[in-house]
Image (cartoon, rainbow, N blue to C red):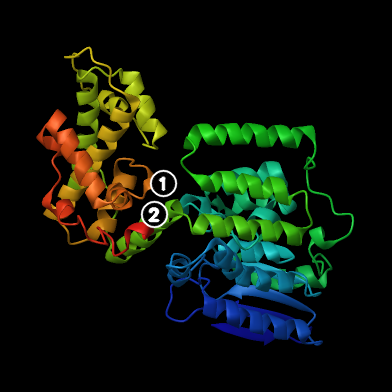
Amino acid sequence: MLTIDIDAEGFATLTIDMPGRSMNVIDWNFNSAFDEVMSGLLADIAVKGIVIVSGKPSFVAGADLAIMKDFLAPGMTPASASRKIGEIGQVLRKFEQGGKPVVAAASGTALGGGLELMLAAHYRIAADNPRARFGLPEVTLGLLPGAGGTQRLPRLIGVAKALPILLNGRPLTVVAAKDAGIIDEIVPPENLVAAAKAAIREGRVSAGAPWDIKGYRLPGDQPSSTATLDLFSMTNARMLAETQGNYPAPKAILSCVFEGMRLPIDKGLKIERDYFGTLVTDQIAHRMIRTLFFAHQTAAKSGWTPGDPADANVKAGREAYVAEGLHLVRDGAQPDTVENVARSVGMEKGPIEIAREQNRDLPEKTSNATVSIDDIRTRLLTIQALTAARCLEADGERGAGHVDLNAVLGWGFPAWLGGPLSFIDAMGAEAFVEQANRLASRYGRRFQPPSSVIAQVGKSAGFYETTRSGA
C-alpha cells in the first residue's frame, strides 16, 4: 500500500498504491498505515523532505465505501462521528506540523479526502493531465469536508475563491486549480517527482503551513472586513434561494468558514469536525449518501448509466409528474403556483415547465376551487413515489437504489429526499398508504398504493434494509 524510497539527498518519496484497486482511496487501514509511515519519516533525522506520490494514474479519489458505511451505522452520534473523522484530521495535522517540508505530487485526480491530504502538504505539484480533477464534492452528498477542507482552502486561497469550490462541489481541471491557487506547479508527468524534489532543494517549500506562522493573514479581504461580511450575506441569501432551505450542508459549510476564519487553525478544525458530525448523522445525508454514493457505485460496477432519458422507469416517473401538474391546473391551481411549490420541495424543474418543453397545452380549468399549497406538494410527491414503487414491482432486479437514483438523475426528484422510495421509507408505509388512499378517494385510481407498499405496513423495514428511524 505504501512504499518508501529515500535518495542520497535525504528526500523520501512515499508512494501510495493500494493493491487490488484502480484508484487509491482513504479507509481506516490506509489512515493507520499512513500515520505510521509518516511518523517514521518525520522522526528520521536522515530525511530532509518528503514527497507524496501515487502509484496509479490518479492521486487519491476520496473516502472508501467502508468509511461511509461506518458513519451511517446505527448508534453513530454527532459526537462519535466528530471524533471518528478526527482520526483522519489528526494524521494530516501531524505531518503538517512535523517540521519537515512535504510536497504532494499528484499524477491525476484528487477529490475529497485526497485533496484535503494535498492541502495539508506544504507545496502542491500536479502533472499536466487533462483528465485530472481537483475538488471537494462532499456537499453533493449532504456533507462537508471533515479533514480540514473548509479551513485550509480559505486560508490558502482566500474566502472569496474558496466558497464557490466548497459550496457547489464541482471539481476543477488542473489548470483551473492552478489558477485558483490550489496547485503551485503544473509539470510534465515524467518530471513529477524530480520537480517536487527540486522545489524542496531550492528552498521553495517551507517546513510548515503559513497559517501556523505568527502574523499570518488570510489572503484577500479579512474576516471582519465589510467586503467579507457582505460576501457571506449575499452568499447565504443566494444559497437559501437555490436550496429552499432543504439542504443543511451548504449552510454548515458557510458557518464553518465564517466561524473558523476568525480563529486559530486548530479551533477551526474542531468546528469543522463538529459540523461534520452533525451532518453525517442527519437523515438527509443518510438518504443522499445511500442514493448518490452507494447506488451510484453499484451502477458503475454493473455498467448501467443512471438517469438515462430513454430508460422506461425515467419516462414513467417524468410522465406521472408532468401529468399530475396538469391535473392540478385542471383542478384549479395556478400554473405559477404549481411551479413554485415544485421548486420549493427541490424538484429540478416544475411540471408545467417540462410540459411546455414538450409542447403540451395546459388544460382548461374544470373547477374554481382553491388548491392549497400543501395539496400541491402532497400530490406531486405522492404520485412520483407511487410510480417509482410500481416501476420496482415491474422490474426489481436492480433494487430500490436503482429506482431512486434514476429518479434523482433522470427526472430531477429532490436529492435531499434520497429518491421516491426513500421518501416512502422515511414517511413509513402505514402513513404513506393512508395518504395515498385518501388521495385516491378524492382524485382517482392513479393514487391507489401498489401491493408492494401495502405489504410493508406494520413491518420494521421498507424498500431498504433499515428501520424506520434510519430511513
Q: Secondary structure at mark 2?
A: helix
Q: Within the image, what quadrant is residue 174 found in?
A: bottom right
Dividing the image into 4 quarters, which one contains the C terminus?
A: bottom left
Mark carried by residue 170: none
Q: Is residue 1 left or right of residue 363?
A: right
Q: Within the image, what quadrant is residue 290 found in?
A: bottom left
Q: Residue at x 89, y 54 (%)?
A: 215
Looking at the picture, tell me which residue is in the foreground, 384 or 231. 384
Looking at the picture, tell me which residue is in the foreground, 185 or 317. 317
Q: Which residue is mark 2?
A: 287
Looking at the picture, tell me which residue is in the foreground, 306 or 443. 443
Q: Which residue is mark 1?
A: 416
Number of other residues with Cα within 10 Å of mark 1, as a class: few under 14, some 14 to 19, many 20 or more: many
Name above or below for residue 408 compared with residue 303.
above
Q: Residue at x 19, y 55 (%)?
A: 457
As drawn, the residue found furthest toward the front would be: 458
- Specify the amino acid type for callout 1: Trp
What percent of the width, then of the height, locates residue 231?
Answer: 68, 35
Q: Are marks 2 and 1 in contact (CB under 8 Å)?
A: yes
Q: Is residue 53 left or right of residue 424?
A: right
What percent of the width, then of the height, locates residue 357?
Answer: 28, 26
Number of other residues with Cα within 10 Å of mark 2, as a class: few under 14, some 14 to 19, many 20 or more: many
- Specify the amino acid type for callout 2: Arg
Spatial CA span between label 2 and label 1: 7 Å
Q: Residue at x 31, y 26 (%)?
A: 353
Q: Secondary structure at mark 1?
A: helix
Can residue 420 be seen at all in this image of the molecule? Answer: yes
What percent of the width, then of the height, locates residue 183?
Answer: 67, 57
What percent of the width, then of the height, locates residue 116?
Answer: 62, 62
